[in-house]
Amino acid sequence: NIQFLRGLNMKRVDAYLSSLGYCSRSEAKKFLKQNEVLFFENRVFNPSTKVNHDNVLVNGEKLDSEKITILMNKPSGVICSHNDSGVLIYSLLPQRWQNRNPKISTIGRLDMDTTGAILLTDDGELNHKLTSPKKDVKKIYEVTLQNPLKGDEKEIFESGNIILNGEEKPLKPAKLTILNDKLVHLEIVEGKYHQVKRMFAYTGNKVVKLHRLEFAGFRVDDLKEGEFRVIEDKF
Ligand code: URA
């Protein structure tokens, strides 16, 4: 039995409870009194008890997973930042997830007025992988324009040689699909600051509505604005 437990990755139960947002480290004693925490069917009361993640039940439920990735359909009006006044995107998540440490952060950002697909994770490696400029992660936006297209936008965006104001290097080629003269889908593999709005500004137009249909293969067609689901994929 001892041999078996040695083979597991054991940590103090209060460390799990606090990093997964159930309670703070100092609240663990009270939490263990008020909630039924079982380790291999034994009730745990002592915060220093060593346990392994997969064999703990809290009020009959397994612990939240150690790494979490969430797909959200971001509503307009919420901010992708941890330190800003205003409504933060994280406030839409369950309180326990908001208490996690390491924190859940968005993978890249959408502007406050932009809606659609955004991933959130506490997995720093995944976040880095999907925001690295080298990885060419695909994003598809539905763009509503103030003025009708002029006709040369598709060619300009696909050329791979437009240089936005304040940038040094040209943008990688982007694909434009025209639905009507004020509604398009734009597929890009970069994520520069305000990129889509700046691309249309470059052509003399203005974006009046921006919705991300897809990020890294994840679409939010099944989610209403503000809704989210946990992504179980192995990345
Ligand atoms: N491009 C923008 O201009 N805004 C966004 O939110 C995303 C891409």
Image (cartoon, grey):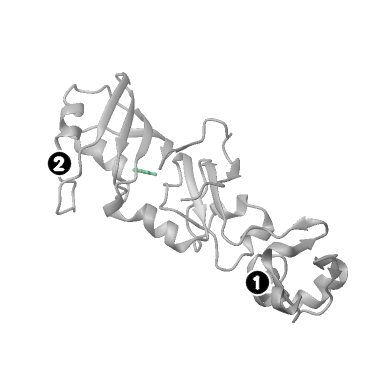
Amino acid on which disc 1 is placed: Leu
Name the residue: 24% across, 36% down: 174
Q: Nearer the viewer, residue 100 or 84?
A: 100
Q: At which x and y percent is residue 4?
A: 70, 73
Q: Is residue 213 above or below residue 66?
A: above
Name the residue: 16% across, 25% down: 152
- Residue 1 seen: yes
- Which badge, 1 or 2, is on the more N-terminal residue? 1
- Residue 24 seen: no
Q: Secondary structure at mark 2?
A: loop
Q: Nearer the viewer, residue 126 or 178?
A: 126
Q: Is residue 104 above or below residue 214?
A: below
Among the 4 quarters of the image, the one containing residue 68: bottom right
The residue pinned by badge 2 equals 162
Mark 1 or 2, closer to the camera? 1
Q: Is residue 137 above or below residue 47?
A: above
Among the 4 quarters of the image, the one containing residue 55: bottom right
Q: Nearer the viewer, residue 216 or 154?
A: 216
The residue pinned by badge 1 equals 8
Amino acid on which disc 2 is placed: Ile
Q: At which x and y percent is residue 53?
A: 68, 66
Q: Nearer the viewer, residue 160 or 77?
A: 160
Name the residue: 42% across, 51% down: 109
Q: Quadrant of ligand 1?
A: top left
- The label number, if any, that marks residue 23 in the structure image: none
Question: In the visual, does 109 lie left or right of 180?
Answer: right
Q: Is residue 234 above or below residue 217?
A: below
